[in-house]
Image: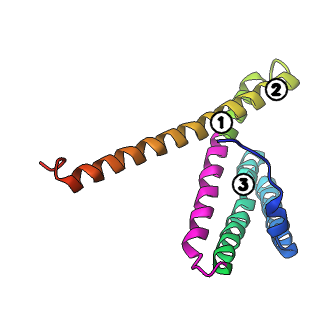
Amino acid sequence: MLIKLSSSSLHQTRWYEYGVRFLLGGLATVFAGVVGARFGASAGGLFLALPAVFCASATLIESHERRAKEKAGFSGRRRGQQAAALDAAGAGLGSIGLAAFAAAFYVTVSASIIGAFAIAILVWVLVSVSAWWLRRTLRITSRRTEHGRQGQSASGRGLP
């Protein structure tokens, strides 16, 4: 699979959807600042790391996919939910990479700040791509196993 950059979603997004993203992201940042001022930087950082913008983007992705299917004359509810779920899976994998970035930076920052950033970015890329590859590989393997079991039980050979 080739990964490429596409600007087509920029043309599909309405102006007020950018406003919603900006507003929710800003509110999450303010909330994290209030939590940080009240309970300390560590607690505030946890809330800042919370992907508040993800909530807005998931709903926008769902509505875009649903709208596209409905324009074609189909019910787009399920397609919208699947697209949002796929985005959520990607956000989860990205969070694993982010945690690896933080750990690598924490371990190496005492030696050199610039070196710590370089190493942490490298670790982030390696962990994120590896997590994506592993998820993709396991998903393909589980589908093959699932199809194999369905085929055996349908023919009667897989039954005890």
Q: What residue is rendered at 71% in x and 71% in y?
A: 64
114 w.r.t. 37: above or below: above
- The answer to whether residue 23 of the structure is visible from this angle is no
Q: What residue is rendered at 67% in x and 38% in y?
A: 97
Q: Nearer the viewer, mark 3 or mark 2?
A: 2
Which image quadrant for residue 111? top right
User: Can you identify the residue that label 1 sits on?
Assistant: 129
Residue 113 belongs to magenta span: no
Residue 91 belongs to magenta span: yes
Front residue of this view, candidates 93 and 102: 93
Query: How far across and down, in percent of the image, does residue 124 sit?
Result: 71, 34
User: Can you identify the residue that label 2 sits on?
Assistant: 118
Q: Secondary structure at mark 3?
A: helix
Q: Residues within 10 Å of mark 1 (few under 14, many from 20)?
A: some
Q: Residues within 10 Å of mark 3 (few under 14, many from 20)?
A: some
Which mark, residue 47? 3
Q: Earlier in the sequence, mark 1 or mark 2?
A: 2
- Looking at the rendering, in which quadrant would you find the N terminus? top right
Which mark, residue 117? none
Q: Earlier in the sequence, mark 3 or mark 1?
A: 3
Task: Report the magenta residues as a range.
Answer: 72-96
Secondary structure mostly seen in magenta is helix
37 w.r.t. 63: above or below: above
Q: Nearer the viewer, mark 1 or mark 2?
A: 1
Q: Report how far apart the C-alphas of labels 3 and 1 lie in the structure.
A: 25 Å
Q: Secondary structure at mark 1?
A: helix
Query: How far across and down, in percent of the image, does residue 140 sit?
Result: 47, 44
Using residue 53 as the reference point, say whether residue 19 is left or right of it. right
Which image quadrant for residue 86? bottom right
Query: Which residue type does callout 3 highlight?
Result: Phe
Query: Which residue type does callout 1 highlight?
Result: Val
Query: Which residue type does callout 2 highlight?
Result: Ala
